[in-house]
Amino acid sequence: MTIDHMMIGSIGLPPDSLDRLQKEILNIGFRIQPDYHPVIVPVTVQDRTILVLWAPGGQTRPYPALPGTAEPSREVLLREYFDTMILKDIVQRFNFGKPQQCIDLYHYLLSNIGRAYTLKSAYEFLKQGGHATSRDAVRDYVAWAEDAWLLFTIPIHSQSQKEQERNYRKVYGIDWALAIRNSTVWDGSYARALENMVYLHLRRNYPRVRYYLTRNKRQEVDFLVSDERGKPVLAVQVSMEISHPDTLRRELEPLVSTARYYGTVQNLIITLRQEQRFEENGVVVHTIPAWQWLLQESAFVDRERVS
């Protein structure tokens, strides 16, 4: 994808702010150890000015990838990455004096990738661990982790802020390996890894990704994706396989209900290998292997951006 094909915001940057912004980015680079400075290029796209940041790889990048690392050393390396993120991106940045609270909370959240959590459950977890904290503090800790791109949380799809606050949120990690090597519990299943991968791909390509609970039975749809205007356009369920009739019904029923309510044209069940087409109550649902969806979705998004 070229610069001409990028999707940018509706405003762009004021030309007189470019020098100041480039200096701020330069100063941020000095806060990374070792120092790291991306290539900054002011460009004009669609009559709007933006800054393009190119982040080339190399031995001095903030978190070097080491593909040749032996298996026993990988877990140690991933734990070191986690510790570095906590120290530099959270503790030092926010001048926080109780790092163990953050560490314990993040271990808890990373253990629940693809699952529900609430502010109350996170608070109770820290409280049971002997930490003197508050719900407002827990809210801050989660926000810091999201700002550091350690993890992401998504609310229920709703136009009501109160409803979003009343319902649970779901948590996803920036990297599955980083998550499982720094979580307290992992059941050995890769079903949540598949869901995490799908979420990250949706997040890269769409402006808003939420989960949804159907109005009557409160059945969960893993992802309800909206366009720039806030209109739901894609409903997604993620399941390793749907061979068992009960599994198929569990995934299909809320998807059909959601599609009928919102009128979503694309309704998918993303699996590991299965491919099939279903039609129920006037709603077409496609089951598609993850690898195939990833390739098709990337091509579709690129076409949309070009047009």
Image (cartoon, grey):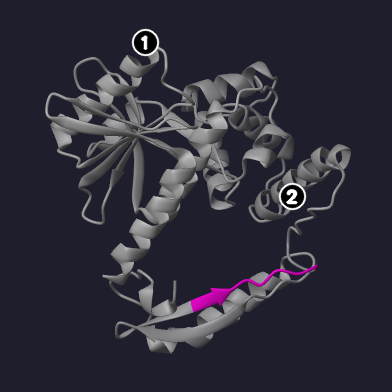
Query: Which residue occupies 17% across, 31% down?
Result: 283
Quadrant location of the C terminus in the rendered image: bottom left
Name the image quarter holding residue 279. Answer: top left
Describe residue 176's horizontal placement relative to residue 49 as left or right. right
The Cα atoms of the two marked residues, 2 and 1, are separated by 46 Å
Residue 116 in percent (x, y) is at: 46, 25
- Quick one: which residue is furthest to the top in this view? 246
Near-viewer residue (196 or 160): 196
| Numbered mark located on residue 108 in the image | none
Q: Does the magenta stretch include residue 220?
A: no
Residue 202 visible within the image: yes
SS for tag 2? helix
Query: Which residue occupies 59% across, 28% down?
Result: 190
Query: Which residue occupies 54% across, 51% down?
Result: 147
Residue 270 in percent (x, y) is at: 41, 34
Looking at the image, is mark 2 or mark 1 earlier in the sequence?
2
Q: Badge 1 local density, few (<14 within 10 Å), some, or many (20+)?
A: few
Near-viewer residue (306 or 19): 306
The amino acid at mark 1 is: Asp
* Residue that mark 2 sits on: 87
| Numbered mark located on residue 246 in the image | 1
Name the image quarter holding residue 180. Answer: top right
Q: What stretch is highlighted in magenta?
A: 52-59
Quadrant location of the N terminus in the rendered image: bottom left
Residue 139 visible within the image: no
> Mark 2, mark 1: which one is toward the viewer?
1
